[in-house]
Image (spheres, rainbow, N blue to C red):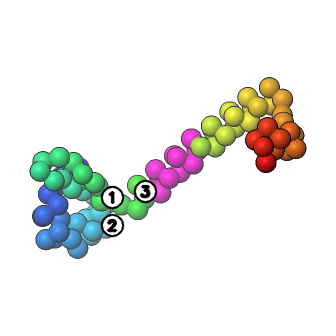
Amino acid sequence: MTKISTVEARDNFSDVINRAAYGKERVVLTRRGKELVAVVPIEDVDLLQGLEDKLDLDEAKAALKEAGEKGTTSWAKLKAQLGI
């Protein structure tokens, strides 16, 4: 993974974008020597989103399973509990 300063990235913005988009390179931008953000290929973002969606789905399934084991609450009862 390439690291460059934000100043260098600003001066070579189109090159940084092209490296990520066409070269499939991950470019980490730094400020005062500290990693700040990354410019990554869109495929990396799509993969990350897919992983997050799978984790969300797994958590939702686990919550539904747990709720099923404890029983369910009717909409009317829930509204009464919440004072709605």
The residue that label 3 is drawn on is: 45
Question: How far is mark 3 from mark 1, CA to CA?
Answer: 7 Å
In the rendered structure, find residue 68 and report the number of the disc placed on it.
Answer: none
Locate residue 80: give its quadrant. Answer: top right
Give the x, y percent position of residue 4.
Answer: 15, 56
Which residue is found at the position 46% from the left and 50% from the top? 48
- Which of 76 and 64 lies nearest the eye of the viewer? 76
Crowding around mark 1 (Cα neighbors within 10 Å: few <14, some 14 to 19, many 20+) is some
Which mark, by number, is residue 21?
2
Amino acid type, residue under disc 3 in the picture: Val
- The kind of secondary structure element at disc 3 is helix
Circle 2: element type? helix
SS at circle 1: loop
Mark 2 is on which residue type?
Ala
Earlier sequence position, callout 3 versus callout 1: 1
Whole-percent x, y for residue 73 in the image: 84, 36
Is residue 41 found inside the magenta-colored segment of the image?
A: no
Magenta stretch containing residue 47, yes or no? yes
Work out whether residue 10 can be spotted: yes
Magenta range is 45-55
Residue that badge 1 annotates: 40
> CB under 8 Å between callouts 3 and 1?
yes
Q: Residue furthest front?
A: 83
Task: Compute the Cα span from label 2 to label 3.
Answer: 12 Å
